[in-house]
Image (cartoon, coloured by chain):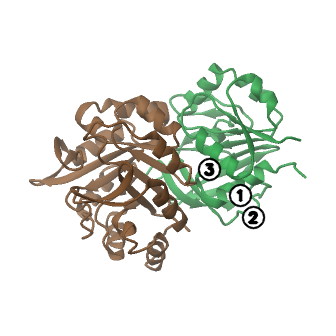
């Protein structure tokens, strides 16, 4: 197996390069996915995202990426907004349908504290998995104003100003992290390494 | 919440310099070397501000940004001379995670904050405020404290928040580079009046200054330059000291 990690580039500017750089540092072969045909050339997918839920879904549609993602059976790692759009529905600038991989809603963080939630924070693992294994005590970098609200498929929670929110999720081979592994020092690189090595002997 | 400890690099390309009271400049080193050093010391973020780009209307040096970004696996904020949405785009393409804007927004067109926030997401738009005490209030200055804007700092902070900025980098023209402590009143007033995170810069001369700032004003982050540049302390020393004083920090 060649094990190429595809980074879905859907016109939302931002952290594509940071993610590519971090994946390379973690030892991956990467391919930036710019068109629908590219999905067949890779073995796993990273779904990044900065911006709003609504714009992200619109851009994915414009690029013709909705269908390949709906039909996808390869492991996916959604990062930040890329995790949020794995949910059923988002409420950022109106109501927008997501991929519905995870039965969840994306809502504004309701905390009596500064929003966006920005900075390093710890995770509290509820159900460990292969990509988070060994990183249960690690700190990761967060930068978000919305949170995924769900009651199943929770991997970890994180506390911010007394409020606990879902900081990572998993269902089958679909993984999502609210934090940015590409911005989380060695712990983030390790998490990416774990994702790259999924299913590898 | 863990207070972010951020290394701030002021650049007069190709060098990182240390402005003293926004005026005299001392060369400290090259951006990518310093960024890497502070990353390895445990910085939570790095900010790189080209402090002359706006004044001289110079182009941002994108290759320097890229080279610096390549050394970092923590967030990297870049600013100085940002005037257009294309500047934002290019900086993100060259590895910036956040773009810092000041002069153009405050002096010419604040609407750029709305546009950038909508396209790139609130969290990646940082507004730098250079505050100077003027009569009984604080006024926004630009171009390293040289030019007045006529805008009240608190009103401007509220305005940039409502326009979609994700964070404020607050500098004090009076305290910058002097290493005599932060302007805590200024920091407190801004932090208390807005909901978005505030990173406070200008004035760290000793560890107690940082502690006093965090305890009194509770900023989301503290940006430190001189104290690190002169190797008085490493970031790990700062964090250990804060932790001993019951202030939460990462690693």
- Taking the spot 75% from the left edge, 36% from the top edge, the residue there is A101
Label 3 residue SS: helix
Q: Earlier in the sequence, mark 2 or mark 3?
A: 2
Residue A134's label in the rendered image is 2
Which of the pair B116/B180 is nearer the observer?
B180
- Using the image, name the chain to which the residue with label 3 belongs: A
Instruction: State the residue position of label 1.
Output: A190
- Taking the spot 89% from the left edge, 41% from the top edge, the residue there is A1
Same chain letter for marks 2 and 3? yes
- Using the image, name the chain to which the residue with label 1 belongs: A
Q: Earlier in the sequence, mark 1 or mark 2?
A: 2
Instruction: State the residue position of label 3.
Output: A182
Q: Is residue A68 above or below residue B146?
A: above
Separation of marks 1 and 2 at Cα, in angstroms: 9 Å
Q: Is residue B30 left or right of residue B17?
A: right
Dot 2: within a 10 Å radius of its alpha carbon, few (fewer than 14), some, or many (20 or more) residues? some
Separation of marks 2 and 3 at Cα, in angstroms: 17 Å
Whole-percent x, y for residue A9 in the image: 64, 31
Dot 3: within a 10 Å radius of its alpha carbon, few (fewer than 14), some, or many (20 or more) residues? many
Colour for chain B in the figure:
brown
Label 2 residue SS: loop
Residue B155's label in the rendered image is none
């Amino acid at each position: 197996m060649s094990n190429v990690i595809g980074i879905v580039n859907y016109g939302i500017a931002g952290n594509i390069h940071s993610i590519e750089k971090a994946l390379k540092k973690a030892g991956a072969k990467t391919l930036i996915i710019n068109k629908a045909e590219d999905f067949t050339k890779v073995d796993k997918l990273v779904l990044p995202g900065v911006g709003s839920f609504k714009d992200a879904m619109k851009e994915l549609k414009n690029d013709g990426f909705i269908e390949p993602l709906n039909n996808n059976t390869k492991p996916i790692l959604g990062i930040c907004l890329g995790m949020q759009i794995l949910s059923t529905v988002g409420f950022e600038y109106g109501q927008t349908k997501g991929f519905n991989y995870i039965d969840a809603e994306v809502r504004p963080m309701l905390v009596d504290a500064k929003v966006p939630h920005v900075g390093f924070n710890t995770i509290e693992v509820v159900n460990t998995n292969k990509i988070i294994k060994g990183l249960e005590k690690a700190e990761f970098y967060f930068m978000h104003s919305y949170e995924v609200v769900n009651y199943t498929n929770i991997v970890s929670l994180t506390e911010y100003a007394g409020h606990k929110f879902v900081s990572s999720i998993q269902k089958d081979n679909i993984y999502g992290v609210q934090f940015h592994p590409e911005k989380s020092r060695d712990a983030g690189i390790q998490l990416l390494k774990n994702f790259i090595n999924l299913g590898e002997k | 919440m863990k207070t972010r400890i951020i290394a701030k690099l002021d650049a007069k390309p190709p060098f990182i310099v240390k402005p003293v009271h926004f005026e005299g400049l001392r060369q400290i080193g090259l951006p990518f070397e310093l960024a890497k050093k502070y990353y390895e010391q445990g910085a939570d973020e790095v900010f790189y501000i080209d402090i002359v780009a706006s004044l001289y209307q110079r182009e941002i040096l994108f290759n320097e940004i890229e080279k610096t970004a390549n050394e970092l696996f923590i967030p990297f904020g870049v600013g100085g001379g940002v005037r257009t949405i294309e500047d934002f785009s290019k900086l993100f393409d060259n590895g910036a995670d956040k773009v810092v804007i000041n002069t153009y927004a405050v002096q010419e067109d604040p609407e750029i904050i709305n546009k950038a926030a909508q396209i790139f997401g609130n969290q990646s738009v940082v507004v730098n405020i250079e505050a100077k005490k003027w009569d009984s209030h604080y006024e926004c200055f630009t171009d390293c404290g040289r030019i007045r804007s006529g805008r009240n700092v608190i009103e401007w902070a509220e305005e940039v928040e409502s326009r979609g900025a994700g964070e404020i980098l607050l500098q004090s023209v009076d305290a910058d580079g002097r290493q005599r402590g932060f302007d805590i009143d200024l920091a407190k007033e801004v932090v208390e009046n807005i909901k978005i995170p505030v990173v406070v810069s200008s004035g760290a001369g000793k560890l107690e200054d940082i502690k006093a700032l965090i305890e009194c004003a509770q900023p989301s982050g503290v940006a430190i330059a001189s104290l690190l540049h002169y190797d008085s302390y490493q970031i790990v020393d700062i964090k250990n000291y804060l932790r001993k004083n019951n202030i939460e920090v990462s690693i």
